[in-house]
Image: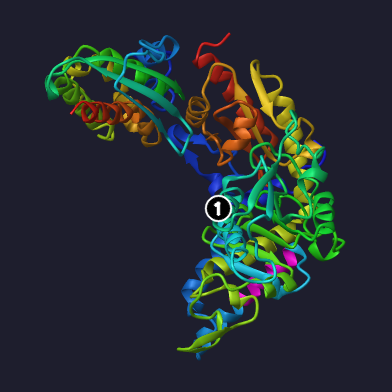
Amino acid sequence: MEGLLPELEVIRADFPILERTLAGGLPLVYLDSANTSQKPQVVIDTMVDHLERHNANIARAMHQLGAESTEAFETGRDKVAAFIGAPERDEVIFTKNASEALNLVANTLAWAGEHQVGAGDEIVTTEMEHHSNIVPWQLLAERTGATLRWFGLTDDGRLDLSGIDDLITERTKVVSLTWVSNMLGTINPIAEIARKAHTVGALVVVDASQAAPQLPIDLAAMPVEERPDLLAFTGHKVVGPTGIGVLWGARAVLDALPPFLGGGEMIETVRMEGSTYAGIPHKFEAGTPPIVEAIGLGAAVEYLGHVGMEAIHAHEQAITGYALEGLATVPGLTVLGPLDAASRGGAISFELDGVHPHDIAQVLDSRGVAVRAGHHCAKPAHARFGVQASTRMSSYLYTRPDEIDALIEALEYTRRYFKLG
Amino acid sequence: MTAHGTDQNGLDALYQEIILDHYKHPHNAGLRDDFEAEVHHVNPTCGDEITLRVHLGEGEGDSRVVADVSYDSLGCSISQASASVLTDLLIGKSIAEAMTIHQEFQTLMQGRGQVDPDEEVLEDGIAFAGVAKFPARVKCALLSWMAWKDATAQALEEKS
């Protein structure tokens, strides 16, 4: 199969969990990577080594361990900056996860400052967003009197751009959208939408939670009119740990936004009468951060960089194409979202006539195949296609074609189990 | 009781034939016009939904009869079958009896597979014993039961 990672078996050996078996001695077929990815040994070892040998609080401990810990943490930031091609390493803010990164932006935009959103302003998002890129904007609209508007979807699961000139106008202050849909898999035309949003002076916020794991991202190489102003993703989907996320923002934008959380480390000086604040990134990192998680994330994105994001993207496309072919052979199965692998990511949601997604996932699990069932935190996108829930398979750099075969076989078994045709 | 020949990691314990029968042919389904209270419950983690109406007979307090339970639901086989079994078990009982059955079913579901169900009380409901071993599915089985309890409490309040 063309496009597969040439050293797939070597890569698989980097992920110890792939060797484990499930109840009944069945091998694990892990097809839930869009939910969370598995972790390579180097991430696990890096985190353990830090805790065993270098643990100390950062940026304040005047001792050797403190210096080592601070350096490891800030090196994590350097590695993340390199991974997304950030124009400046200080533009990388560590957060708890992508949700917190998006909430940081949506909250600080409500407060006084150059970019403050107010009554009469408009915020634009899309119908295919994860709830974490809908709810913070709904809250911002409620708090400020602004109006939330959104791009609808076409029947094949793409953004309906036909009304873009009515949607993005002089009233638009923010356009926030996902790069890759976690439900439909669709890859959105970020450059085109950013270009349009920038002509009206709106900020462009991109949820890259599903894009960062599988698409090469080079922010510095993007023409500035097409580059997002802010970009969020989470660590645990890029083979890193949970508890750590990233907000990248252009320096001018981050400098103009007011602080989010107040506390230690985010200040310049504090007097009872008032305080002044640190520059970025620390301005947005109040309190002791998730230190070992940031270090683990650094190891994770460095690992992905060594494998090569171009190669990982090609692998995902090859596996996705193979999966789409296989799923098409299952009677009564309908894929939600684009049907060509080139314009989508590696998450494929589908329906199977006559069996509820929970029941599908349960039967698949009994065969060792791990998928997700439900609304995938994208209820509006499900509602758009008239479905309450779906089953989703999602691959990653360690997925082998025979695991897709196992999924298809298990789906056939599911049909027999529920006595369909 | 295994419906499908070979058991796949307890799958047949979960999907008893009784459950699949109720799923494919649910009893007392649909919303009917006589009711004192209507509730809408969702399982936020999976999106399963049920709209459920309770109609109580005349009388006082716990001695009133559950005259009807009607419902419209979306969800997996476990949640759908559970609603169907609920109506079979509770319609026609006094509220006091129905609450006892409710408690018995809830105890079974939350017993992690360690509780022996009483067939005298639960009838077809004993088929859900296997569900208790699948923690992720317990909420599916309890969705309609929690909705019924809520609706009944509201119906009683309305009358008092």
Depth order, front residue of B137/A163? A163
Quadrant hosting residue A314: top right
- Residue A6: x percent and y percent? 78, 47
Eyeballing the image, is A16 above or below B88?
A: below
Q: Is residue B137 magenta?
A: no
- Can you identify the residue that label 1 sits on? A142
Eyeballing the image, is A130 above or below A284?
A: above
Which amino acid lies under the numbered mark 1 shown in the image of this protein?
Glu
Depth order, front residue of B113/B95? B95
- Residue A117: x percent and y percent? 65, 61
- Residue A329: x percent and y percent? 70, 19
- Residue at 55% from the left image edge and 42% from the top image edge: A377
- Residue A266: x percent and y percent? 55, 79
Depth order, front residue of A185/A16? A185
Quadrant hosting residue B134: top left
Magenta stretch bounds: A73-83
User: In the displayed image of the protein, which residue is found farthest to the front?
Assistant: A120
Instruction: Residue A207: tell me if it is visible.
Output: no
Report the quarter where the N terminus of chain A lies.
Answer: top right
Chain letter, disc 1 residue: A
Instruction: Residue B110: tell me if it is visible.
Output: yes
Task: Rate crowding at label 1 as few (under 14), some (14 to 19) or many (20 or more) other CA atoms within 10 Å.
Answer: few
User: In the displayed image of the protein, which residue is found farthest to the right?
Assistant: A223
- Residue at 35% from the left image edge and 32% from the top image edge: B138
